[in-house]
Amino acid sequence: MNRSLRRFIAASVASLVLAACSTASDTSAPDTTPEDGSLAGETLVVYSGRSESLVDELFTQFTAQTGIALDVRYGDSGELASLILTEGKASPADVYFSQDAGALGAVSEVGLLAELPPDVLEQVDERFRSTSGQWVATSGRVRVVVYNPTLVATPPAGIDDLLDPQWKGKIGYAPTNASWQSFVTALRVIRGEDAARTWLEGFAANEPVPYEKNGVVRDAVNAGEVSLGLVNHYYLYEKIAAEGADAVVAKNHYFLNGDVGGLVNVAGVGVVASSAKQTAALEFVKFLLSAQGQQYFVDRTFEYPMAAGIDAYFELPKFDALNPPAIDLSDLSSIEATQQLLEEVGLLTR
Amino acid sequence: MSPRSRVPVALLVPAIIGALIALLPIIYLVDVAFDRGLAAVIDELWRERTLRLVVRSVGLTVAVTAAAVVIGTFTAWAVVLSGLRAGTMLLVVFSLSLAIPSYLSGFAWISWFPELSGFVGAFIVLSLVTYPFVMLPVAAAMRSIDPVQDEVARSLGRGPVSAFFAVTLGNVRGALTGGALLVALYTLSDFGAVAAMRYEVFTWVIYGAYRAGFNPARAAILSLVLVALALLLTWGEMRARGATAPSRLGSGLARRQRHHLSPGFSALSIGVSVIVVALGVGVPVVSAVSWLMRDSERGLSTTRLVSSILSSFQIGVFTSLATVLIALPVAITAARYRTPTTRWLERSTYVAHALPGIVIAISVVYIGIRTVPSLYQHIPLLVLAQVIVFLPLATASMRSAVEQSTASVEEVARGLGANTFATLVRVTLPIAMPGILAAAAMTMLSSVKELPTTLLLRPTGVETLATSIWTFSAVSDYAAVGPYAIALIVLSAIPVAVLTATTSRVLRAS
């Protein structure tokens, strides 16, 4: 007993020392803005609902160019929104960068995001920014039907066609995916609760096949396991980029007729109202909307750019041609009601 | 053992502090839940859906607990009493199941067997992840059984099976119910498995309230239902535990007990053991290894892997030291002084274990940022949150260790003039040391795989193994997940080894 106890204590002490060293280096001097107004040397705390593997390169570029360091806390967009709501005015966050508009809507609703200046807001189409000016979209994604042309001659023209018995058991979807749930939220907001429930019941009766994630849905369509998949537009291009165009038979069908199925949802950013570093935080927002930031999203994620006159990835329909359904994106914050409805019609949980 | 009614102040005060720490989340929950008045709470709860959630959560908890008791008792028996040669080896392998986070295991299962989603999948994953909570204390208790009891029962005409149920299980009752309680509370609070299996229980809805509803008040109200269920469970367990703790009369050492098995039964036991290990450890480990074979978008960053291992280790060691220190007074008072006060103190430490990690994290955020803002998002508050999560694991393990040593030795020490403190340090603690080490190891193990409090409370920028796994699996980059998952399992092998070593030491000592 004694020997192992001694070893255990030795290991603990060693790690305590390690910890003490690293904590000491964490608690560096408090940030001060230099007198000359330069922001270099400032540190911003970013709560990022966009994943690290997607954005850390862009964040590094920001620091290299501005000298503003970033402390990034990655997490689920919704959890981070709840975290800011719990922290309230004491939040250490300076910037909230979210995967979807709904979570931004929830934080801005209680006044925890600062109003952005007009020169920032006006860079983005007003459909894709907060109506109260508290956040802007940084990139967009459109809902599509990915289909397998060897199995499908004419893809459905709108979501109501998905209820046709010919698709019974042949549609793949990702029940827990946030973008699918945003689409259902849009359906509720645009058509009303009753009509949304009716559509979902019809959809459920058509026995759609649930998959873990959107990427798996796409692969199932490509492999011919199912004929159609309800996903975001970029999954197809990710696969083509990874495996080459020859390996991919699946194609995207875009609803260009204003159908709810063609919802455009966005990732967006807001400045936390209680932050003492408003200027630096705004720099960060401007950087995301700059040509460099926008081009990064186009190249890395195949998403639609939102500002700076950048063109979308050449394979995509022009953004102006998309004709998405009209909706205030902040209204997409009622995701919990959507989940409850999905649970009731048996499309979410078992 | 003779329960004495007066608890020394030197033990009582730290025990009360431990219990209060464990109850911090309750303060937050009540504060937030009743923010809009009692009517809002009733309105939130008085729904058909609440009843459905209670039925589903309780159903899953009962099923998982039953399965974990069966598997845990069987594995303990296989390790200690079966006479299978590989006993200690088996204990290590069986315990490894504890090292595998339910989110990883859940994901491995669902990607191989998508048709399992729902109750069945959640049941399988949780039973396999939790049975060591039963196996470890029961194995320790089985080792201290005097084989004479079994022989007496056999000589009075009982068959081997009957004697097993009457004598062996009778002797390990306290360990069994304690382990079962941990399993039940863990099941109520787990999110990883039910999320992978899309099974709608309380934690599912509570996470939904945070992630999709941005509604901490609703989450708090639903969490209070879990607290009520936890109180009910701990109360039930204390009734079932029985008034007497097992002990041997007289002095000396007991012989090691072995059951002699027929070759057929022996083969069957080996077969079942192999299946348990293959399902509990094999499925997730093979998945993790198969992820390594896939193409990753990015190369493995060794720096990040190493720093993740170090952070996980560091947080794990802090958490386990703090948890053991805080739980020890509660465990000693609960084992030695059976008064209503000590019973309540012990019960308090269990309650938070039924709460999903995110609720504890958010409550520590809420309280921490308002009271000690300078510590917010630094290691101490993260450790505090994890202490709250893991207190019951440590308390349970140490309480049964203290109980198994006879109180009479302490009385002798006092009779020889040692004061309470000296008795504690020179007699009680050394005797309970295997249990204390086991508690430390179990806490460390759980801390390393813990995700929700780490995600919200770690210092900004610090990555652990668990957060790295989360990061890469969120973007389906499983090739990148592989090394972290394997590192997590390997790192967990250290506490598992401590756990096993201490449990086998109990064996050799007895």
Image: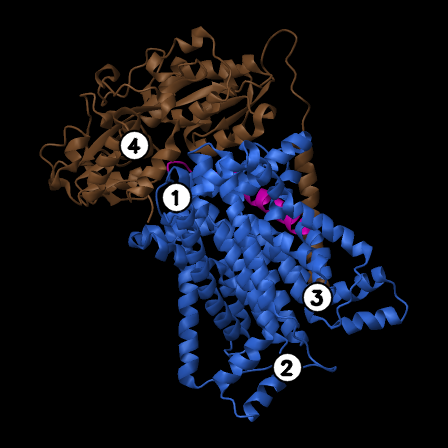
Chain colours: A brown, B blue
Residue carrying label 3: B402
Residue carrying label 2: B146
* CA gap, disc 1 and disc 4: 32 Å
Residue A184, numbered label: 4
* CA gap, disc 2 and disc 3: 18 Å
* CA gap, disc 1 and disc 3: 46 Å
Residue A28 at x, y percent in the picture: 67, 27
In this picture, residue A64 sits left or right of residue A192:
right
Pointer 1 with pointer 4, Cβ within 8 A: no
Q: Nearer the viewer, residue B445 or B61?
A: B61
Tell me the magenta residue range: B297-322
* CA gap, disc 2 and disc 4: 64 Å
* Foreground label between 2 and 4: 4
Instruction: Answer above or below: position of B168 versus A153.
Output: below
Q: Is residue B451 in sight in this rendering?
A: no
Query: Which quadrant would the N terminus of chain A be assigned to in this image?
Result: bottom right
In this picture, residue B358 sits left or right of residue B394:
left
Secondary structure predominantly adopted by residues drawn in magenta: helix
